[in-house]
Image (cartoon, grey):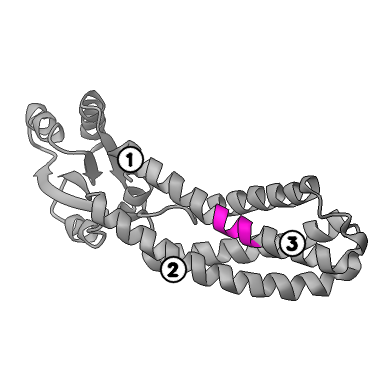
Amino acid sequence: MRQLRYLYRFICAIILTAICTLSFAWLWRRFVNHFVEKSLLLGLGNTALACIIYVFTFLVVGQFIRAFKIGVERKSKLLASVILTILLTNAIEVLFSMAILNNFRYFRGFVWRYALLSVGQCIGCGMLAILMVDVYRRFVPPIKVLIVSGKDNDIKQKVDQIYYKYRVEKVICADEPDEVIRREAERHEAVLINDIPAQKENTIVKISTFALLNLVKTSDEIRVCEQQAC
């Protein structure tokens, strides 16, 4: 199931990148064909170069801003990341486009055309990203989590806030015997450790490693949980 999550996110990233790149390539060819004398840069090699630069920029920016974390981030945060990735990529591409044409007098022409392109891409990719999240939540079940806690607190309530990613199956006390914790850990996909002594924590780490489970250590519980158990 974990590999399925990664595969789905990879496919989603490819789809978003392809949509933005193809729309960019269409606009690029129209611009060059209209403004550049004799359309010297309409050759396959130059168009491919422009597209390769665009793909590389889009992937780097998107990875840095977490625009491809389908099913990991909240919809609002993912949507903002996708939009910001598109805007930054197209802004950077203005400079690359002028460099390829070796003529900076096209600056204004590129700016307003890429601005319109960005609007279309943001609407299309934004709607598609939301659909991808819905599909992910429908077919990929939440991770079953076991909470091992040192004292009573509201950690379960905090994890329940991201119900679409994690489902707390059970909460046990860290004072339970190691064998009990081992048995319970083997029934879950992830173990969340919260507020327990270091010695006991090391013991649970060994148990979880033996059971080949995802270990989630928490200081700021929800933040670390989202980063490591997804």
Residue found farthest to the top = 210
The verdict on residue 19 being magenta is yes
Is 219 positioned to the left or the right of 81 in the image?
left
**Type of amino acid at the residue the image marks with label 2:** Met
Splitting the image into 4 quarters, where does residue 90 fall? bottom right
Q: Which residue corresponds to mark 2?
A: 127
Residue appearing at x 12%, y 35% in the figure: 187
User: Mark 3 sits on what residue?
Assistant: 28
Residue highlighted by disc 1: 4
Question: What residue is drawn where x is 84% and y is 61%?
Answer: 98
Counting residues from the start of the chain, the first of labels 3 and 2 encountered is: 3
What's the CA distance linking mark 1 and mark 3?
A: 36 Å
Judge left or right: residue 187 versus residue 107: left
Residue 136 picture location, percent across and down: 31, 54
CA separation, marks 2 and 1? 23 Å
Residue 82 belongs to the span the image colors magenta: no
Q: Which amino acid type is shown beneath numbered disc 1?
A: Leu
Query: Which badge, 2 or 1, is on the more N-terminal residue?
Result: 1
Characterize the local packing of mark 2: few (<14), some (14-19) or many (20 or more) Cα atoms within 10 angstroms: few
In the image, what residue occupies the spot 64% across and 63% down?
88
Provide the secondary structure element on which disc 2 rests: helix
Instruction: Please state the extent of the stretch shown in magenta in the rendering.
Output: 18-23
Q: Amino acid at mark 3?
A: Trp
- Please state which of residues 203 and 167 is positioned toward the viewer in this rendering: 167
Tell me where residue 111 sits by quadrant. bottom right
